[in-house]
C-alpha cells in the first residue's frame, strides 16, 4: 500500500489556493475549495498541460493550454478538447497536515 505524503500544514493552503507536490513520482495538484481539500494529477488528458497553473473557477480548473475544464473534486473532464478524466487521489488531514496518497496501484 502506498504511503501518505504531507503536502502542507492545513492552515497553509487557503480557500481557492493550490499546491503542486510530487507523490511517488506523480505530480499532484492539491486544491482548497471552500475549506475542503481535493487532489488530482496535475496533467491535462488532452495534451499534458499543467492544470494547477490554470485558472480555478469554483470547483473547476481550466487548462491553461487549450481551455479544457476539469472537476477538481472528481478529476472528470467537463469540456473539450479533453475527454478523459485525470486521476483523482484521496486526501486526509493528519496531525494538522494535509496528506495525499497515490492509491492507483494498491
Ligand atoms: S493540454 Fe489541456 S486543453 Fe490541451
Image (spheres, rainbow, N blue to C red):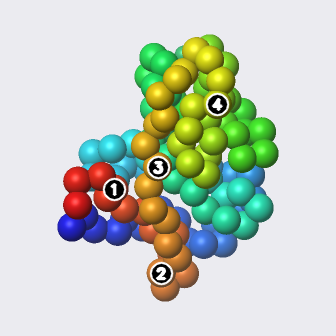
Q: CA distance from mark 1 to mark 4?
A: 23 Å
Question: Which mark, residue 88?
Answer: 3
Q: Nearer the viewer, mark 4 or mark 2?
A: 4
Question: Against 74, is 2 above or below?
Answer: below
Question: Which mark, residue 94?
Answer: 2
Q: Nearer the viewer, mark 1 or mark 4?
A: 4
Q: Quadrant of the C terminus?
A: bottom left
Q: Nearer the viewer, mark 2 or mark 1?
A: 1
Q: Nearer the viewer, mark 3 or mark 2?
A: 3
Q: CA distance from mark 3 to mark 2?
A: 19 Å
Q: Quadrant of the N terminus?
A: bottom left
| Residue at image mark 1 | 102
Residue in view at x 67 percent, y 58 percent: 32
Q: Position of residue 49 (x, y in %)?
A: 50, 23
Mark 1 and mark 4 residues within 8 Å of each other at the beta carbon: no
Q: Nearer the viewer, mark 4 or mark 3?
A: 4
Residue farthest to the bottom, as pictured: 95
- Count of numbered labels shown in the rendering: 4
User: Disc 2 or 1, which lies upstream in sequence?
Assistant: 2
Residue at mark 3: C-beta within 8 A of ligand 1: no
How crowded pointer 1 is (Cα within 10 Å; few <14, some 14-19, many 20+) is rated as many
Residue 30 in view of the camera:
no
How crowded pointer 4 is (Cα within 10 Å; few <14, some 14-19, many 20+) is rated as some
Mark 1 and mark 3 residues within 8 Å of each other at the beta carbon: no
Task: Label 3: state its secondary structure.
Answer: strand
How crowded pointer 2 is (Cα within 10 Å; few <14, some 14-19, many 20+) is rated as few
Q: CA distance from mark 2 to mark 1?
A: 16 Å
User: Disc 1 or 4, which lies upstream in sequence?
Assistant: 4
Answer with left or right where residue 90 lies relative to residue 60. Answer: left
Answer with left or right where residue 103 lies relative to residue 1. Answer: right
Q: Position of residue 40 (x, y in %)?
A: 49, 46
Q: CA distance from mark 1 to mark 3?
A: 9 Å
Amino acid at each position: 500500500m502506498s504511503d501518505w505524503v504531507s503536502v502542507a500544514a492545513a492552515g497553509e493552503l487557503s480557500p481557492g489556493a493550490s499546491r503542486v507536490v510530487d507523490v511517488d513520482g506523480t505530480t499532484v495538484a492539491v486544491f482548497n475549495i471552500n475549506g475542503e481539500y481535493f487532489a488530482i494529477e496535475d496533467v491535462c488528458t488532452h495534451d499534458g498541460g499543467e492544470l494547477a497553473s490554470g485558472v480555478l473557477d469554483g470547483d473547476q480548473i481550466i487548462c491553461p493550454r487549450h481551455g479544457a475544464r476539469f472537476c477538481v473534486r472528481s478529476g472528470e473532464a467537463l469540456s473539450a478538447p479533453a475527454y478523459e478524466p485525470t486521476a483523482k487521489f484521496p486526501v486526509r488531514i493528519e496531525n494538522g497536515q494535509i496528506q495525499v496518497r497515490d492509491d492507483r496501484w494498491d
